[in-house]
Amino acid sequence: MKFTVLIHSEDDSSAPSMVAQIERTGPLNAATFGLTLAESKSLLANVQKELVESQLQCFVRKQRICTHCNTRRTIKDYHTVCFKSLFGGVSSRVHRLNGCLCEGQDSSARTVKIDGLVNWVSPELEFIQSKLAATIPYARTADLLGVLLPVDTGNTPSTVRRRTLSVGKRLDTELHDAADAVQIESSKTDTDSVTEVGLDSGYVKDCRPSSEGSFEVVVGRIISENKDSRSLGFVRTIENNRAAGHRLKRRLSEQGQISAGVAVFTDGDPGLRCLLMSALPNATHILDWFHLTRRLTVLKRVLFGQEAINQFPTDYHDPLCKYLESLKWRLWHGYIGGAINRIRAILFTLRLPTIAGKRAAVRMRRLIKELLRYLKNNQDSLVNYGRRYRSGRRISTAFMESAVNQLIDKRMSKSQQMRWSPMGAHALLQVRAELVDGRLGIAFFRWYPSFTGEKQLCRVDI
């Protein structure tokens, strides 16, 4: 059994071209049943070659006709290029056409150019490589595409990395070059309103030999009423506070008008708090309950540890336990003054001569002093958490922890141990943020109006 696959252009009078020949001999078995991957690769590559050559020839014929006098331009010379796509590389001749006489004697020769095509790389190849590289390592992206598709030229890990970071830099430049759209006006007619904003940070390993080991990456998430959440990320050493504020304001303006009761969440980091409050000066800043109680949990572990039980007499240990439980209750209900008084009572007990020199007491004094300093620095961010919780409102940055996990950990840190340069991590963050939000395909549709990528591929579960 033998099959011959032909391709023929209805606009061309030439004979059909053979693109594949499939032959089956011998008894039918599982290995010869249907089309194989190698045959499909060869078929796709040959169809792509015929299609590209026919399209380019037709395009050059049209470009040779002068739009002013309909005179046919002459060919000055040509050079060979390789068009790189998901279905293989195709080498073609690109002509340079002389100027027409109606344009004057000084008209120069011009190379035939295809609108929107940069470096003769298919937008779909760039899109698929960027989407995969934002999820898995560059080398695995190249291997995966090489296994499934006839893509060969321009599919090395270094090329995948360069193209992905180029997409990230383009997204970053596009955001910063947006024309004064950072002004958030209260007169917006958009019915959507931003209700909650959060910022958090994580650390990734630095690949530079002279580095200190890691650098900080900041991620954020904006939640509005009727829209999907919006993510953002940047490397703190790359962007100063002004640029970071510009980025945040731009993302806020995309999500809609600012709600009157918008709440901003951080873990108490002064830099993140200043950034949020500069973009949203009238917002309510809330200290994350999880980060607050984590300090209390450490204190509780020390107090109920075997060392403290052995070193503290019962007359001292029981009051300390009551003070600690009372401290948490007052923080939960927003009684800041009472909470600080409980901290002072704990410090007074720990300074009593009977237990002041014990190792557990020294450790607890250090932890309780850090907690007191933490509360004083964020005193205006402490709210009645119990009331907010009972009314169904958010009290923690759990949504930010998921953002850190999605944007940083899954690609840069926990799941895939690797080292990064600050610029490389910053550019990849832009691609990954768009991918997590399901907007990477929208960016390609914006850059290439005739982009024919599948819309269902623009959003993936990562």
Image (cartoon, helix red, strand yellow):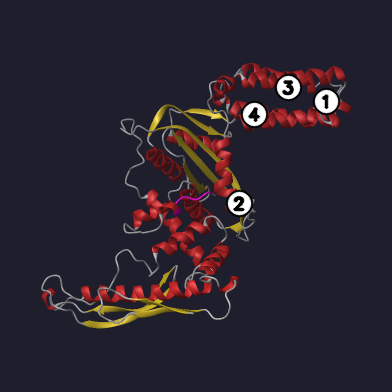
- Which numbered tag is attached to residue 204? 2
Q: Separation of disc 1 and disc 4 at Cα?
A: 21 Å
Identify the disc placed on residue 373: 4
Proximity of marks 3 and 1: CB atoms separated by less than 8 Å: no
- Image marks 1 and 4: residues in contact by CB distance under 8 Å: no
Residue range of the region highlighted in magenta in the rendering: 457-461
Residue 356 numbered mark, or none: 1
SS at mark 4?
helix
Residue 111 visible at all: no
Residue 327, placed above or below residue 222 = above
Report which quarter residue 349 is drawn in: top right
Q: What residue type is labelled 3?
A: Leu
**Would residue 399 appear left or right of 312 to someone viewing this image?**
left
Q: Earlier in the sequence, mark 1 or mark 4?
A: 1
**What residue is drawn where x is 59% and y is 19%?**
334
- Estimate how packed mark 4 is, as few (under 14), some (14 to 19) or many (20 or more) residues with alpha carbons within 10 Å: few
Tell me, yes or no, if residue 371 can be seen here: yes
Q: Where is residue 332 in the image (x, y as percent from the top left)?
A: 62, 21
Q: Dot 2, how many residues are within 10 Å of its Cα: few (below 14), some (14-19), or many (20+)?
A: many
The residue located at (57%, 20%) in the rendering is: 390
Q: Label 3: which residue?
A: 324
User: Which mark's residue is nearer the viewer, 4 or 2?
Assistant: 2
Q: Which residue is drawn at 48% across and 48% down?
A: 433
Question: Residue 27: image x %, image y %?
Answer: 58, 77
Task: Sort mark 1 into few (<14), some (14-19) or many (20+) by Cα contacts within 10 Å.
Answer: some
Q: Distance between the residues labelled 2 and 1?
A: 40 Å
Q: Is mark 1 on a helix, strand or loop?
A: loop
